[in-house]
Image (cartoon, grey):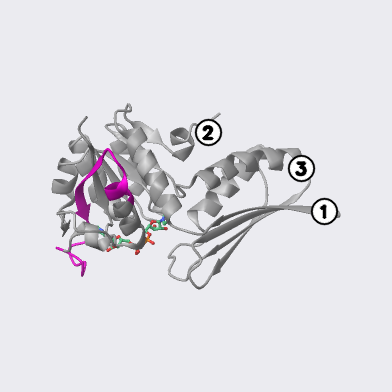
Amino acid sequence: MNPLRVAVVGAGGRMGRMVLGQVLGTPGLALAAALDRPDSPHLGQDAGALAGLSPCGVPLGADLAAGVAGAQVAIEFSAPAVLMALCPAAAAHGCALVVGTTALDATPGVRQALGDAARRVPVVESANMSLGVNLLLGLLGKVAAALPHFDLDIIEVHHNQKKDAPSGTALAMARALRQGRGGDAAIGLHSLRGGDVVGEHTACFFGPGERIEITHRATSREIFARGAVRAAQWAVGRVPGAYDMQDVLGLRG
Ligand code: NAD
């Protein structure tokens, strides 16, 4: 069988390098392109070396359209504005999209671009690609519904380079809690930034005389990269549409 051709966008970044490593190390996948911004200091470097592996013969490039033209699926962890160019290019070439970048709502036009692309290709978007967090999201609504009088708070902790606060995962947790309460609930959101914390999210349920805390701790970015690769394998061949990790992991419903 021919290997699945995968393009990686934001390939010079923290997540991008992890994804490169996963793509190069997963049987049945071939790296079709490694892409970053035109002024990236890593342009021209071998993608294998960027991932800390042996050279693979694919240099880091900056031509998004050419990159997705040769790929069946593009995995993206970069910046919201990148999607304004990536979405139409992927749609035009029939290339499925896995979107990992967070804080998409803060950039006008990005949601529209994603929606337009999802009419023509499968688009998987998730602010957190880990299996554990997606299981947690399913759980939170049930706990919030079972404890209708408990106060709800979310605490998230991330490294000091993270640009958005609260995290996309914290916002998804708040949505899950609100859904559990029938759409209406006051939820405190608290963000801490420091050091090299990969990502910690705690949902707190405060009741009279007792409290429940449910925490997810990510100790390695590998979990997001592995999830993104799983999403890419799942997406290719699906009907066009907007999907998330609940679909990929079969957790919906
Ligand atoms: P980073 O800053 O280390 O990497 C971003 C990369 O994107 C850089 O190499 C940068 O040069 C590149 N880039 C920027 N503009 C570009 C452009 N116009 N064209 C091509 N490449 C461009 O950031 P990171 O830590 O890798 O995080 C990237 C995104 O992924 C953030 O939004 C972060 O919140 C998100 N993230 C999501 C998950 C998830 O599971 N969904 C997990 C971790 C991080």
Q: In this view, does 27 lie to the left or right of 193?
A: left
Q: Position of residue 9 (x, y in %)?
A: 26, 53
Q: Position of residue 191 (x, y in %)?
A: 57, 64
Q: Nearer the viewer, residue 236 or 94?
A: 236
The residue that label 1 is drawn on is 210
Determine the secondary structure under disc 2.
Answer: loop
Q: Residue at point 23% right, 49% down? A: 85
Q: What residue type is labelled 2?
A: Leu
Is any atom of residue 79 visible in this view? no
Task: Single out the residue that lies furthest toward the bottom.
Answer: 195
CB under 8 Å between callouts 2 and 3?
A: no
Q: Residue at point 29% right, 41% down? A: 27
Q: Where is residue 56 in the image (x, y as percent from the top left)?
A: 18, 54
Q: In this view, does 251 lie to the left or right of 66?
A: right
Q: Which amino acid does label 3 sit on?
A: Leu
Instruction: Give how far apart the Cα atoms at labels 1 and 2 are.
Output: 30 Å
Within 8 Å of ligand 1, the CB of disc 1? no
Within 8 Å of ligand 1, the CB of disc 2? no
- Determine whether 231 is above or below 217 in the image: above
CB under 8 Å between callouts 1 and 2?
A: no
Label 2 packing within 10 angstroms: few (<14), some (14-19), many (20+): few
Q: Residue 147 carries which label?
A: 3
Which badge, 2 or 3, comes first in the chain's sequence? 3
In which quadrant will I find the N terminus?
Answer: top left
Within 8 Å of ligand 1, the CB of disc 3? no
Instruction: Give how far apart the Cα atoms at labels 2 and 3 are.
Output: 23 Å
Is any atom of residue 9 visible in this view? yes
**Range of residues picked out in magenta:** 22-44
The residue that label 2 is drawn on is 251
Task: Single out the residue that lies furthest toward the top.
Answer: 239
Residue 39: name its quadrant: bottom left
Q: Residue at point 15% right, 41% down? A: 69
